[in-house]
Amino acid sequence: MAEPLVRCDVVDEIATITLDSPANRNALSRALVDDLHAALDRAEQSDVRVIVLTHTGNTFCAGADLKERSAGPVDSSKMVTVFRRLMESRQPTIAAVKGAVRAGGVGLMASCDLVVVPATADFAFTEVRIGAAPAIISVPIFRRCSAAQLAAAFLTGEKFDATRAREIGLVSHVAEHAEGVDVQVRLLVAGLLDAEPEAVAATKTILRTVPGEALDTAFPRMQRLSEALFESPAAAEGMQAFFEKRPPAWARGRR
């Protein structure tokens, strides 16, 4: 049996999913996407509170596997489902990127809630240079950036750096170097583990669904959600802990 192209390790409620196909720059081959689904099956279990997506090699993900794409009919449905799973999972997702990102790899990265990269990272939407378009990946990307901000990069395939990626909202954190990515990810994970899991899941849904929603539907829906959360046992514990100046029951600091 071939070695998996994606690994999932769960330690202390953190699932670390590692793209491990450096020979083809972690391209989104059928085998890698299948293994990524299997890793997400494990990561989405109830004993996991945070999912970190990272990689081996000097490229996070080079996008579609062009050898496969040129060899026969194209079916991207499983890749689309991977993007949706990262966006819609109850657990918060963090992309820990330590190298270059290209084409569909940018879409994979952008499907995560938080993205940490080193200052040396660079990005490019290379689809137009091979006669394709950044179509599927535009869905998660345009939930982070405006079309105007990415027009030049989409239309020309030109590279841009981590500073520009942060300016337009494509990434959330830029570390000085690759080692700093791990430090920043640990800080983010610590903060997430101090937050109540159901509240984090609800907040993730808010971030995904409220922008662009009509006021007449957004306010009533958010009012119902807010009142339900404030009346929940978790909020009762959280407020009691606040009054008693102690960590709430779910906080990692209690352990």
Image (cartoon, helix red, strand yellow):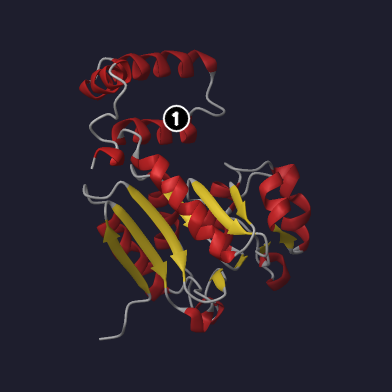
Q: Give the SS element for disc 1.
A: helix
Q: How crowded is mark 1: few (under 14 residues within 10 Å), some or many (20 or more)?
A: some
- Percent coordinates x, y for residue 246 in the rendering: 29, 26
**Residue with the mark numbered 1:** 206
Q: Can residue 31 be seen in this view?
A: yes
Find the residue positioned furthest to the front: 245
Q: How many marks?
A: 1
Q: In which quarter of the image is the C terminus?
A: top left
Instruction: Please state the horizontal and vertical placement of residue 177, each as a whole percent of the image.
Output: 62, 63
Q: Point out the image quarter for the N terminus.
A: bottom left
Residue 54 percent location from the top left of the image: 46, 64
Quadrant position of residue 70: bottom right
In the displayed structure, would residue 151 be above or below residue 62? Answer: above
Give the answer, above or below, for where 221 lies relative to 64: above
Q: Which of 26 and 183 is in front in this view?
A: 183
> Residue at horizontal 42%, vertical 49%?
93
Of 132 and 234, the residue lying toward us: 234
Amino acid on which the number 1 mark rests in the picture: Ile
Q: Residue 24: horizontal and vertical position, in percent?
A: 52, 81
